[in-house]
Amino acid sequence: MKSPKIAIVANSTWNIYNFRLGLIRELTKVGYRVIVIAPIDEYIHYLGDNYFIKHIAIKRLSPQSKNPLKDVLLCKELYDIYKKEQPDLILHYTIKPNIWGNFAARLANIPTISTLTGLGYTFLHGNFTKYIIRKLYKVALSKSKRLVFHNGDDLQLFEDFNLIPKGRGEVIPGSGVDTNFFSPFPKSPAKKFIFLFVGRVLYDKGILEFVEAARQIRQVTKNTEYWVVGQLNAENPTAVSKHQLQVWLENKDIRYFGNSNDIRKFLKKADVFVLPSYREGMPRAVLEAMASAKPIITTDTAGCRDTVVEGENGYLVPVKDSISLAEAMLKIYYLDRNELREMGNASRDLVLQNFDEKIIIDRYLSLIQNITEMKVAKDKTKINV
């Protein structure tokens, strides 16, 4: 008898490469057959190192599209793939796979696990579109075997809005971080005290508050720099314009380094990691900084608050409050090197206890094994009858 087949579906190959490879490797190691279903982008090179993966390209998935006809065609495309491949279980990630992939899986009579990594702009903003998205979630997720959220706030919100069946959701805190790849580095000798922001350059990530706090701190310090690493994303409604970024650079408010495939070279030089985001699922960039033994300053909001024990590995500040952010940044700036090192070590310990990739993968393996074993037993019963 063939081992169970698992399908993993996401909105980009980038998502697979950055967040799912550890799980895929472990699934194949314990005997599952794995197929990946995602649009192809430059990260398709991951196949060169993992010959056991079959990648099926989705042609009709456009994350930013609001065209309902395209979404119906996406559902049909996924249904055709599911019927042909007949996986024993489908893992859906990101918004459109979680909605249209679950509709397709229900038509194909295949069980699913749905992971809601964050709520997305359309769920939180707007009026009519937000209403439609919530209604789609309620119907799409109603038959999913298990609903995974990256933080308890998101799970509570879905239950409060009656979008998911009670008792079917659980929290698995993020995708995990490879604590061997991200490990403490000796701080590079530098005359500057560096505050590092890593993330897409969006207002929702708190970039404006970071810039405003930097302006305040520069008035009372002479040796601080404020580094920003991340992608400009013009398609996102909260994206910072190129013109605005240019103004900040001309005013020397920040130093901008663009996108990076290896953030460790920036973490190595940073003293403190700052992410004043308005809301997250579980901020991977923060976890990577914690694994690298950096003190953290972030916001007291969903996802972010789970990464900080106040005063031990960093500080939490209110959302959209650049004054409180500047105060927290100055508080860390004035710590001596031993206190700063202790905060960083506390970050590392917190990751090892709660967010290590091995812990997260084991949680998923347990869910997957339970569902696939039940399906195999059910299929055997049908055959015997």
Image: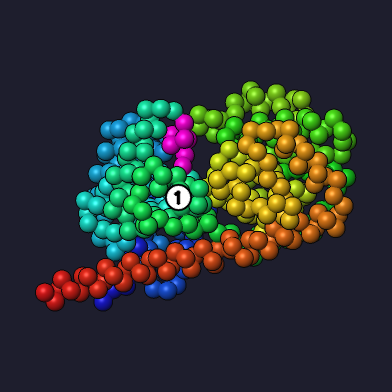
Q: Please indicate, yes or no, whether residue 57 appears anywhere in the rendered image.
A: no
Pointer 1 residue: 155
Q: Residue furthest left?
A: 385
**Location of residue 304 in the rendering, given as x and y in whole percent from the top left corner:** 60, 47
Vertical arrangement, residue 266 with respect to residue 216, above or below: below
Which residue appears at 75% of the width and 25% of the height? 250
Q: State the colouring used for the structure image.
A: rainbow
Task: Between residue 53 and residue 294, name the one nearer to us.
Answer: 294
Give the amino acid at mark 1: Leu
Where does the N terminus fall, quadrant-wise? Answer: bottom left
Residue 157: say if magenta. Answer: no
Which residue appears at 57% of the width and 34% of the height? 204
Which residue appears at 26% of the width and 71% of the height? 376
Vertical arrangement, residue 50 with respect to residue 151, above or below: below
| 214 to the left or right of 58 | right
Vertical arrangement, residue 338 with respect to residue 243, above or below: below
Dividing the picture into quadrants, the one containing residue 90 is bottom left
Residue 123: say if magenta. Answer: yes
| 101 to the left or right of 14 | left
Task: Between residue 133 and residue 104, name the one nearer to us.
Answer: 133
Please state the extent of the stretch shown in magenta in the rendering: 119-125
Vertical arrangement, residue 320 with respect to residue 194, above or below: above
Dividing the picture into quadrants, the one containing residue 365 is bottom left
